[in-house]
Image (cartoon, rainbow, N blue to C red):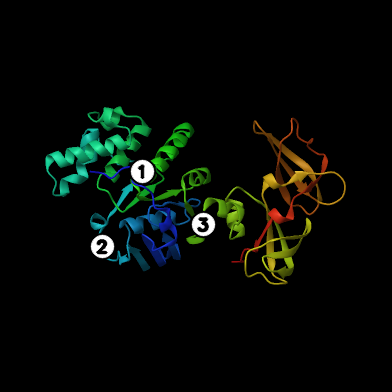
């Protein structure tokens, strides 16, 4: 019977990983889809591979699932190499984007299909199927065919089929992308709750930042076949490791500059917006090219001295607030959130400021 409502041991997040990748590389005819990445995925965690189309996240997921062979590198599950282990023998199940349900089988027959290869009695199989369907709230639909279900219901069936064998690792490949916005939000809550109750490790692929933040204990941000950062959602948002992460996650304002001095965990950077002393990534040195990152919600309209000047170019009403875009004299486009009944007029000059202690300095992107 499926083990539901098991207590989640979050202490495992810092101990021996369930899954580890070492210098994992994948080529497709000379195209480098995954470029020698290292990562660790903890026991009983929800981890998301996040990045734009073509960044390598699905290729990495398929190598973990056993559907693609590594070009080089090592994948270990529970400390054992997965090299040469076929997909059918890995304690890993996958929920695909199109759900891949058998149209001629009922819901309960779809869920029980994978159990046919195990040495279980009919009573045990029926019990496991019943438990899996109950976990995803699909018991009343057990006799229906997939064509009689909504998209959200089909996804629940696909989840039940994947968890009925109690895999060590569940892979989810863009499983929410076919659902409408409201259904995606509902399923995000259900997925996270299911993962907690099962005490199972979920590895989820998506290009949707909101989805990744709603679901994840950790996020692995990928770009051009490389891992830019692996950390908690809060760490990635507040302390991005690279300018790419700062821009991709939440669209931070970025001002290029050069480091004037470094003192402990802070640095002074000279930018077209001015000179600022802010927290910074480790490793920066005087004279290095760098980028100042300022989140839109941290900028404020201010009067008097200080800050920097800009001209309002665009405003967007977002219900509880306004998104305001402005361009500085140096040509940098800045966005900020204005929590006022009316925004500043387009074409008007404004002075903007922020708390330097909440800014963040990262290395400049490497060229080439």
The one nearer the camera, 66 or 93, is 93
Q: Name the residue under label 1.
A: 197
Work out whether mark 1 precedes mark 3 in sequence or the reverse, and give the earlier one.
Answer: 1
Of all residues, the one furthest to the bottom in this rendering is 286
Q: Is residue 92 left or right of residue 250?
A: left
Image quarter in which the N terminus is found: top left
The one nearer the camera, 163 or 158, is 163
Q: In this view, does 53 lie to the left or right of 124?
A: right
Q: How far apart are marks 2 and 3 (CA)?
A: 29 Å
Of all residues, the one furthest to the right in this rendering is 304
Q: Distance between the residues labelled 1 and 3?
A: 23 Å
Above or below, 262 against 312 in this view is below
Above or below, 174 against 145 in this view is below
Instruction: State whether residue 267 appears in this view.
Output: yes
Q: Mark 2 points at which residue?
A: 85
- Residue lying at 74% horizontally and 33% vertically, measured from the top left: 340
- Residue lying at 62% horizontally and 67% vertically, measured from the top left: 282
Task: For the residues labelled 1 and 3, say whether their Cβ atoms are less than 8 Å apart.
Answer: no
Q: Name the residue under label 3.
A: 231
Mark 1 or mark 3: which is in front?
1
Image coordinates of residue 130 in percent, x first then y, are 23, 36
Q: In which quarter of the image is residue 26?
A: bottom left
């Amino acid at each position: 019977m499926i083990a539901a409502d098991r207590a989640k041991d979050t202490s495992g997040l810092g101990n021996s990983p369930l899954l580890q990748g070492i210098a994992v590389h994948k080529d497709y005819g000379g195209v480098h889809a995954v470029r020698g990445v290292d990562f660790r995925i903890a026991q009983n965690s929800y981890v998301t591979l996040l990045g734009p189309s073509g960044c390598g996240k699905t290729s990495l997921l398929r190598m973990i699932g056993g559907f693609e062979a590594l070009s080089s590198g090592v994948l270990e599950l529970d400390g054992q190499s997965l090299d040469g282990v076929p997909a059918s023998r890995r304690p890993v199940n996958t929920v695909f984007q199109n759900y891949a349900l058998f149209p001629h089988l009922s819901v309960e027959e779809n869920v029980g299909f994978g159990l046919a290869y195990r040495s279980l009695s009919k009573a045990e199989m029926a019990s496991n199927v019943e438990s899996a369907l109950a976990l995803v709230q699909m018991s009343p639909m057990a006799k229906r065919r997939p064509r009689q279900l909504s998209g959200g219901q089909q996804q629940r069936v696909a989840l039940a089929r994947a968890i009925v064998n109690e895999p060590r690792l569940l892979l989810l490949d863009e499983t929410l992308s076919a659902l409408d916005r409201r259904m995606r939000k509902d399923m995000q809550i259900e997925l996270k709750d299911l993962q907690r109750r099962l005490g199972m490790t979920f590895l989820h692929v998506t290009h949707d930042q909101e989805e990744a933040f709603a679901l994840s204990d950790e996020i692995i941000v990928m770009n051009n076949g490389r891992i830019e950062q692996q950390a908690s959602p809060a760490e990635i948002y507040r302390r991005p490791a690279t300018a790419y992460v700062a821009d991709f996650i939440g669209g931070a304002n970025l001002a290029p500059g050069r480091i004037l001095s470094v003192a402990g965990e802070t640095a002074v950077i000279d930018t077209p917006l001015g000179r600022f002393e802010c927290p910074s990534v480790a490793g920066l040195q005087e004279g290095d090219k760098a980028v100042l990152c300022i989140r839109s919600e941290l900028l404020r309209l201010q009067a008097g001295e200080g800050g920097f000047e800009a001209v309002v170019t665009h405003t967007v009403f977002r219900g509880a607030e306004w998104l305001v875009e402005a361009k500085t004299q140096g040509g940098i486009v800045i966005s900020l959130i204005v929590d006022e009944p009316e925004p500043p007029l387009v074409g008007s000059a404004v002075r903007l400021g922020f708390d330097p202690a909440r800014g963040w300095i990262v290395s400049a992107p490497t060229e080439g």
